[in-house]
Image (cartoon, rainbow, N blue to C red):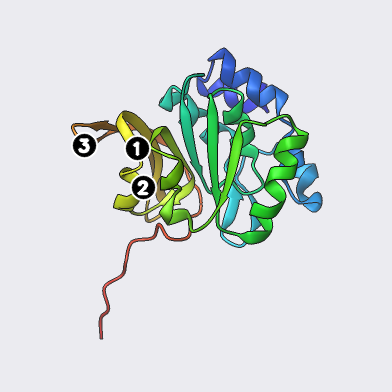
Amino acid sequence: MVDTQVRPSDVTKFPIIQAMLTVPREAFLPSDKAEIAYISEPIDIARDRTVLAARTFAKMVDALNVTNDMLVLDIGCGYGYSAAVLARIAEAVVAVEEEADLAAEAPGILSETGADNVIVHEGPLKDGAPEHGPYDAIILEGGIEELPEGIAAQLKEGGRIACLFVEGRLGTVRIGYKIDGHLNWRYAFNASAPILPGFAQARAFAL
C-alpha cells in the first residue's frame, strides 16, 4: 500500500511512511473486510462510516505537516486506524466517534497496537471535543459540505485543519490556516469520500 499508493502520491515524509508501514490497517476493520484492507479506495466499516483511501489520508496528514509536538483532533475515527497512524507522528490525538459500537471497540484496538497517546471521545462528530482542545491540527475522516463553526473554534491560532469539501460528484481537499481568528483556505488536492454525518449542508425547504 505504501509503495503503490502513498509514495507515488508524493508523500515522502519519513514519519508518515514509517507510521503507515507500522500500523496494521486490517486490525481496524471488521473481520469480513480484513482481506481488502489495502485496496486503494475508501472502505465501508459501518453506516455512514469509512476508512479513507490510504492516498487521501496520507496526503491530508502530509499537507497538515503534523509534527511530534502537536495535539491533533481526529474527527470520525471509526475503529481508530487514522488515530493510530497520527499517534505515531503527533504528541497526542483526540479521536472522535459517534457510533457507539465503534467508539467502544476503538480504545482496545488502539491499545493493542501501541497507540497509548490517543483519547477516544464518543459524541456527535459535528461537536468535536472542545473540552480537550484547542488543537494544533484537525483532520476530518470523510467528506463535508460545510464546516460547523464549533469545529473551527477548536483550532488554535496558527493551527491547521484538513477538510475534504464535496460539491456534487467532485471532492477537493483544502487546508485551512487559522490567522487572526479566521480560516484562510488553500487548495491541496482532489479526492473523494462519503459525507460525514452532521457535515451536510442544510437544504432549503421548497414546495
What's under tag 2, amino acid-wise?
Answer: Ile
**Badge 3: residue crowd in 10 Å (few <14, some 14–19, many ≥20):** few
Tell me the residue at 64%/53% (across/down).
Answer: 103
**Badge 1: residue crowd in 10 Å (few <14, some 14–19, many ≥20):** many
Could you say where residue 48 lies in the image, as x and y percent from the top left? 56, 60
User: In the current view of this chain or complex, which residue is farthest to the left?
Assistant: 180
What's under tag 3, amino acid-wise?
Answer: Gly
Q: CA distance from mark 1 to mark 2?
A: 7 Å
Tell me the residue at 78%/35% (across/down).
Answer: 112
Viewer-nearest residue: 126 or 122: 122
Dot 1 corresponds to which residue? 155
Dot 2 corresponds to which residue? 151
Could you say where residue 190 lies in the image, as x and y percent from the top left? 41, 37
Q: Is residue 165 left or right of residue 105?
A: left
Q: Are marks 1 and 2 in contact (CB under 8 Å)?
A: yes
Dot 3 corresponds to which residue? 181
Could you say where residue 67 lies in the image, as x and y percent from the top left? 48, 19
Q: SS of the residue at dot 3?
A: loop
Q: Is residue 113 left or right of residue 127?
A: right
Tell me the residue at 31%/70% (across/down).
Answer: 203
Q: SS of the residue at dot 1?
A: strand
Question: Does 22 sit above or below residue 34?
Answer: above
Could you say where residue 187 lies in the image, as x and y percent from the top left? 32, 33
